[in-house]
Amino acid sequence: MAVRKDTLFEQFLAPVFKFLINQPELERFYRRIDWEQERDRLRDPNLVYPDYYQSQNFHGIEGGYLTTGAAVSYDPVTQYALPPNETWVRQGLVDAIQGNPRRILDLGCGTGSTTILLKMAFPQAEVIGLDLSPYMLIVAETKARQAGLQIEFRHGQAEQTGFADSSFDLVSASLLFHETPSEIAQAVLQEGFRLLRTGGEILILDGNQKTLRHTEWLTNIFEEPYIQEYAAGSLDGWMGRAGFGAIRTDEWWWLHQISRGVKPILDTQPDAPPGTGVQLNPVDWSHGLPELA
Ligand SMILES: C[S@@+](CC[C@H](N)C(=O)[O-])C[C@H]1O[C@@H](n2cnc3c(N)ncnc32)[C@H](O)[C@@H]1O
């Protein structure tokens, strides 16, 4: 893994993480996988990586998420980046779900930690995790297999997934939006809206935008190219612009936030172009989702 030596992350945090991480265990995991073969199996050969993604060294790692190093080190480092406890933080997203989804899409699923919790909470649901990095997906698949869970992991772009309109009951994204420019965050929310059926929910776990605005030093340390743009924005506003109703964002353990929105019933004219409908009362499906036709 090529790592820039001049970054704050490499100078101050990497030595701490090296101390905390079980390196021999990491190397054993790395050697167990034929990365090239697995990458070629999972990779969509027609996918063109967007510039905002492949041009950045996320977390100071050259090549960012398109490297085996990023994929292998992600979980060991992330457990310390989600205080007070990684599982509690992720479980907050799962617990905020109000319906009983039968088809779930986890956007920017990475190594699948939240995707796995979703499948555990809704074992009957078809759960799909989608990510731009085939290396992250390799780790996600390995973890799901070890947990005995049937989850499909798909190489793809969150803002242009290729799935059919209204084909999901729940779309989720954890820790994705602080890693994208705000116009991409907006495009991802629009794609989520398109993918959800009426009454479907979107759930987003990410950094607390209010807290991040006052902790620039923190965002500098972690080498996140778009996090200040994310902090300055408003997820609620982006969700509203995408068409969601019943929008609500709650602070979660001070550093994080959980946002929820619902695809409302639209009173569309028969000939109106998609997305031009008049929004009626946002629907609250807190007592369960209606039966699918
Ligand atoms: C910080 S990680 C979060 C991973 C996982 N959701 C989690 O909670 O640990 C961000 C992930 O988003 C992926 N990603 C970034 N932009 C994306 C996009 N436009 N479409 C799909 N995945 C994307 C990256 O490859 C990376 O795996």
Image (cartoon, rainbow, N blue to C red):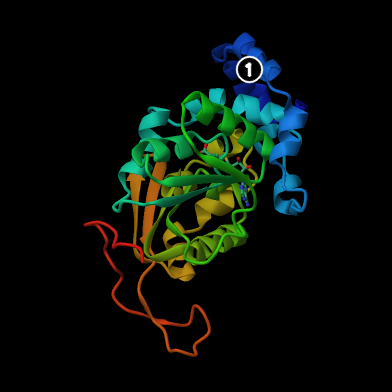
Residue that appears at 29% across and 68% down: 283
**The disc labelled 1 sits on which kind of residue?**
Phe
- Residue 145: % across, % down: 53, 28
Residue that appears at 26% across and 64% down: 284
Q: In which quarter of the image is residue 260?
A: bottom left
Q: Is residue 276 visible?
A: yes
Most extreme residue toward the left, as rendered? 287
Q: Can residue 4 be seen in this view?
A: no
Most extreme residue toward the front, as rendered? 293
Q: Quadrant of residue 75?
A: top right
Q: How crowded is mark 1: few (under 14 residues within 10 Å), some or many (20 or more)?
A: few
**Of 255 and 100, the residue lying toward us:** 100
Going by the image, does 260 lie left or right of 153?
Answer: left
Rendered position, 159 above or below 95: below
- Residue 273: % across, % down: 53, 84
Going by the image, does 286 lie left or right of 82?
Answer: left
- Residue 72: % across, % down: 64, 25
Residue picked out by circle 1: 29
- Residue 101: % across, % down: 36, 52
Q: Quadrant of the N terminus?
A: top right
Classify the position of ligand 1 by quadrant: top left, top right, bottom left or bottom right. Answer: top right
Rendered position, 137 above or below 200: above
Going by the image, does 284 lie left or right of 279?
Answer: left
Residue that appears at 71% across and 52% down: 52
Rendered position, 44 above or below 287: above
Going by the image, does 13 lie left or right of 4?
Answer: left
Q: In which quarter of the image is residue 201?
A: bottom left
Q: In which quarter of the image is the C terminus?
A: bottom left
Name the element at disc 1: helix
**Of 47 and 3, the residue lying toward us:** 47
